[in-house]
Image: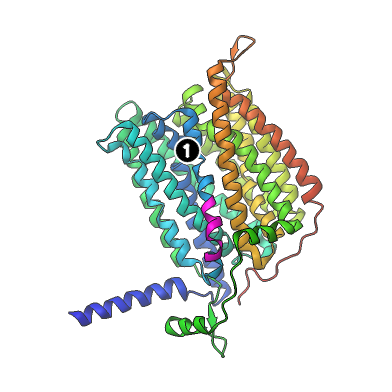
């Protein structure tokens, strides 16, 4: 019995080592399959992010008695959670491979499924609200820890000349998956809202659980083009051989966080890409976290209407995303990002003039502009960082950017939340119409977006790009 247990233990450990530490791509077909698996994993992850955020999270938190301003702040906890990346820089630098870390952190998305079962707990509303905020924050910490490693991993699988094309196709597939499931889940909430909304929460929790399984399995099937320790024949070592090689290798002195920050800031290309991310973060977190509750609580839009509009416009987004990606490969990431950000600015501007009496047509117009913007903003911001960051410092600089901008975004959302509460208490009126706080916040967001587009035009598009010829190639 003891022998069988030992044998099974070694077998399981061996299989895990093979899957998570020995899965090197051996052909172009392996690279292609890995990119396909990542598309599947990312589609599941993006769907989870939407179901455990935005309108659905706002509905869950409203049900437990959380105010609009606090909903916006809690929704922005994902940005504050990114700060944890900064304290793990030295640990991440010591890792030779990221696959196991990325998969383990992805598994913690199960906490988001648990969120929707909290209303069933026989406890007070205040404790439920605290539990929702705590689990959401912890889940976001794990997601944020894995993000830079995930980004570096997929960047190493895609040739630089094809980034726009691949990421646009990936996003098109993800958008179709997200919009389809969001439509279904919106109809579920609408159906059970007048009957028993707890049943709707349970079904959404189950859907998130299934998506987590898909996400983790897809990541496990991917190959990772990174090697640890090599022997004299150039072959990778594992197990005891790798352990001995690690002990014999000269351990380099770790840089402090401040030292890493200083080195990054002194690089002019890093500063430019980082500035773009900061301007976008400032604009987004000034208003966007508070719009979901505005749609439901003030504009009184139905879930089904929101999801039907989103589904139709996401089909449009699926159509234009590959075209924008190919244009970015041809004309540059900066030019297409400037266009996408300007569309986002117009989205904020339209929402600034949206009120209950014109909510339905204005929401459709704002959504059209938003769909055009979101077709490329994520791709453009990431693409500029890949173009401007040194390949040997890419993972570290991605971590710095994500963590610092995450903290910045959270602070902006807290200030905006306080401003929202002050404006709401003031009960402002203009020409006989009530002025909602979200209208003023969206107007502020539009002004910041205009500054961001000007910065890109004069500081990003004029910068010469050094092409990375190592990514997407067999080592």
Residue 63: name its quadrant: top left
- Residue at 56% x, 76% y: name it: 27
- Residue at 60% x, 41% y: name it: 316
Q: Which residues are magenta?
A: 83-91
- Judge left or right: residue 143 versus residue 379: left
x and y percentages locating residue 431 in the rendered image: 64, 10
Magenta span has 446?
Answer: no
Residue 225 visible, this angle: yes
x and y percentages locating residue 198 in the rendered image: 31, 34
Q: In this view, which residue lies farthest toward the top?
A: 432
Vertical side of 467 occupied by 265: above or below = above
| Residue ID for mark 1 | 74
x and y percentages locating residue 293 in the rendered image: 49, 29
- Callout count: 1
Magenta span has 90?
Answer: yes
Q: Quadrant of the N terminus?
A: bottom left
x and y percentages locating residue 305 in the rendered image: 48, 29
Vertical side of 128 occupied by 262: above or below = below
- Judge left or right: residue 298 versus residue 166: left
Q: In this view, which residue lies farthest toward the bottom?
A: 232
């Amino acid at each position: 019995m003891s022998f069988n247990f030992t044998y099974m233990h070694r077998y399981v450990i061996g299989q895990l080592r093979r899957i998570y530490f020995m899965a090197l791509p051996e052909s172009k077909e392996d690279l292609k399959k890995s990119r396909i698996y990542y598309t599947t994993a990312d589609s599941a992850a993006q769907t989870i992010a939407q179901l455990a955020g935005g309108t659905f999270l706002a509905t869950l938190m409203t049900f437990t008695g959380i105010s609009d301003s606090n909903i916006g702040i809690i929704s922005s906890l994902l940005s504050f959670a990114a700060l944890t990346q900064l304290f793990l820089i030295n640990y991440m630098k010591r890792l030779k491979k990221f696959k196991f870390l990325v998969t383990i952190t992805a598994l913690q998305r199960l906490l988001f499924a648990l969120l929707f079962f909290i209303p069933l707990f026989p406890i007070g509303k205040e404790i439920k609200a605290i539990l929702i905020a705590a689990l959401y924050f912890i889940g976001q910490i794990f997601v944020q820890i894995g993000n830079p490693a995930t980004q570096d991993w997929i960047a190493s699988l895609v040739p630089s000349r094809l980034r726009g094309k691949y990421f646009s196709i990936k996003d098109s597939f993800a958008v179709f998956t997200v919009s389809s499931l969001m439509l279904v889940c919106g109809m579920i909430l609408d159906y059970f809202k007048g009957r028993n909304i707890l049943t709707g929460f349970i079904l959404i929790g189950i859907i998130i659980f299934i998506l987590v399984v898909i996400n983790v399995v897809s990541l496990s099937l991917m190959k990772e083009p990174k090697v640890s320790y090599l022997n004299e024949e150039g072959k990778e070592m594992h197990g005891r051989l790798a352990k001995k090689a690690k002990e014999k290798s000269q351990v380099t002195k770790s840089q402090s966080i401040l030292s890493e920050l200083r080195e990054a800031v002194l690089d002019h290309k890093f500063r430019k890409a980082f500035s773009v991310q900061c301007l976008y973060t400032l604009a987004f977190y000034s208003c966007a976290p508070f719009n979901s509750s505005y749609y439901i609580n003030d504009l009184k839009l139905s879930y089904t209407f929101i999801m039907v509009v989103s589904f139709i416009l996401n089909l449009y987004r699926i159509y234009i995303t590959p075209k924008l990606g190919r244009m970015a490969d041809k004309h540059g990431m900066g030019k297409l990002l400037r266009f996408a950000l300007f569309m986002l600015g117009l989205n904020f501007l339209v929402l600034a003039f949206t009120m209950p009496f014109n909510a339905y047509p204005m929401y459709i117009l704002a959504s059209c502009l938003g769909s055009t913007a979101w077709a490329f903003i994520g791709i453009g911001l990431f693409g500029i960082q890949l173009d401007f960051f040194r390949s040997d410092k890419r993972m570290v600089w991605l971590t710095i950017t994500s963590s610092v901008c995450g903290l910045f975004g959270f602070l902006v959302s807290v200030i905006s939340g306080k401003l929202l509460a002050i404006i709401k208490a003031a009960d402002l009126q203009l020409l006989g119409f009530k002025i909602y706080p979200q209208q003023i916040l969206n107007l502020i967001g539009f002004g910041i977006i205009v500054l961001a587009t000007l910065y890109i035009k004069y500081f990003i598009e004029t910068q010469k790009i050094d092409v990375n010829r190592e990514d997407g190639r067999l080592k």
